Amino acid sequence: MKLIVTEKDTAAKKIASILGGNDVEKDSFYKVPIYRFKNSLDGDEECACIGLKGHILQLEYPEEYSDWRKVEPRALIDAELIKAPSAKAVVRALKKMAGEADQIIIATDFDREGELIGVEALKQAIEANPDLEKDVLRARYSALTKDEVTRAFSELSDLSYPLAYAGEARQDIDLIWGATLTRFMSLATSRLGNQFLSVGRVQSPTLALIVERELERRAFKPEPYWQVFADLDSSEGAFRARHKTNRFKVLKEADAALEKAKAAGSGRVTGVKSTRKKIKPPAPFNTTAYTKAATSMGLTAARAIRLAEDLYLGGFISYPRTDNTVYPKSLDLREILTELSGSSELGAAAKQLLARDQLTPTRGKKQTTDHPPIYPVGVPGPGDLRDDAHWKVWFLVARRFLATLGDEAVSESNRLDLSIGDEPFVVSGSRIVEEGWLAWYPYSRSKDDEVPRLEEGAEVSVVDVHREDKETQPPGRYGQGRLIELMEQNGLGTKATRHSIIQNLYDRGYIRNTPIEPTETGIAMIRALNDYASLIAKPEMTAELEKEMSSIADGDMTKQQVVDRSRELLHSAYESLEDNKEALADVIVKGIQEDKVMGACPNCGKQLRVIRSKKTKKRFVGCEGYPDCSTTYPLPQRGMVMSMGKQCPECDTPMVKVIVPRRRPWRLCLDPDCPTKEEYKKKKASKRKAS
DNA sequence: GCAAGGTC
């Protein structure tokens, strides 16, 4: 029997159905599905296909390093690392199947982690059946289409151990740096237990991006400027024009222009300009582009990913974790359109495209072998999707697919130049004159703004001229979609992990709110790392690691060399941290203290802080004016409490946010007797009665 | 109780 191992169950199922046709028998061991079939392309050879759950082993330190207090973090740098089974049922099922097999075909994803997952699985299989070592093959496919899978299985090759070892180097380096520095920081600041302060190759530079932006905002000095607008009337109706000097830096000049225009009473058009511009249809969706589009519709990144996963598992969209922005040749675009033509909303568009002799999809800049870009694979029926959010996301993916096959749109920019009392004014706007792909993909479309169709020399009368007083704005905070895009540009994280890295920063109390702002703890952590171990807080560490991984994959370096060199770098970073332990702990502890300030005391105006009672060990909010002011408020005892920086509109006490892992975060004001809590109290009381 | 990478 030939054993085929894929990275996930859906791939196993699909491959079995492609190679086995209608005679696939479903079996299972330890609740892990197995697909048995006879491969008609291969002399009716008996095959079994098993799907893993991604990595099935977990890298860890041996038992004797587990007590944080007893082990000096430095010792983790050169400690031995072990790999233990993490997906135990899968490992058991795999071993069981390996016992029956005489050949093994590794058919995990066609990327670096896929190679590593394959090698990990192979090792487990060989443990169960040493004879298998003699007959190992690798199938590499970049789409789960019939053509591509049959091609891959007719051109089986060998596993690339160097590529897998490159992945192992990454695993080792991530754990060594992460564990050593996380423990060092946590111990230095006495943040043990579930309050530990984490540090990592991806999370720390990501946090640094957020902190840098916040510090720019804090350093920003707003400058006043003034704009002058004229409300005008004409033969084409009323409209508003703006003074050609968009921003007056000197108030007097703005007022002088305003007075002149006002006094004039009328003006005339001095120029009319119209230009046309083509707007190219967008590239196919990869995970980053999808996430950015979905977050701009108001979803959080984690939710957007979750929704896409649901649709994928439901059979409505293709695999959502991909870097690729170029449809592979084996992807049958017409077949997808035929499927879409069954949709009541999009069917017409799909049929329109099907009627064409040739389809020319757009191509993005990234072309990879992992998976195709994200496209719709099925049209959900009325009751198929759980809620509106799922529908929104399915339409986004389906419309994007149509858009990538659509025609260019054309926009027209119009501009009127006016002279009012010798002062130059302008009106400008643009509108879509040929919809092209925009008809199917309305998300990025900006509203048409019409410019009155006046001709040069036309008279306008002045209804009113006014001034608006404004200030230059600091650079904006990042939204989650923008941050994911920045992470990709900086090489931080992967398509499958970026959203969870951001979620981690929230859960650890390093960042809050959306758009994202760092907490004082987060800012302090980056300050400390920048000062004493700057490598870990910069994207360059990842860039360097990528280069070295390529060297390992190409056979120019060994994993041992790369990991050892990284260990040396960490030793020197560790020295610097150890030498400055007190100063650095001071910075971070100050940040943590600042995050404990929940706002101003409504009774005396001093700061309210989260305090832990020495007697009862319980936490509460108390006034720093104690004992002069004895204001206190109770707090939930579990989860993280954060200031929201505002007061309750009802009771005027500060509002806080409580974040408990695996629960939806909630907001509340400090006053337990606030009228906003009546409802909640009633519910609780009736629940108590019921039980 | 550490990371980041897979996948559910």
Image (cartoon, coloured by chain):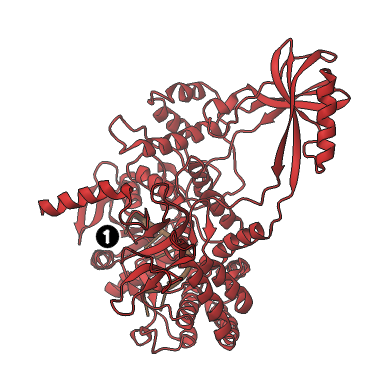
Letter of the chain shown red in the rendering: A
Q: Quadrant of residue A636?
A: bottom left
Chain label for disc 1: A
The residue positioned 60% from the left and 72% from the top of the image is: A527
The residue positioned 45% from the left and 86% from the top of the image is: A79
In the rendered image of this protein, which colour is used for chain B? brown
Q: Nearer the viewer, residue A9 or A504?
A: A504
Q: Nearer the viewer, residue A613 or A587?
A: A613
Residue wearing tag 1: A1
Q: Position of residue A256 (x, y in %)?
A: 85, 33
Which residue sits furthest right? A422
Q: Element at badge 1?
A: loop
Q: Is residue B7 above or below residue A638?
A: above
Say whether residue A114 is visible. Answer: no
Which residue sits furthest top? A235
Asked whether, in this view, residue A197 is left or right of residue A492, the answer is: left
Q: Nearer the viewer, residue A56 or A578?
A: A578
As shown in the figure, which amino acid type bears the numbered disc 1? Answer: Met
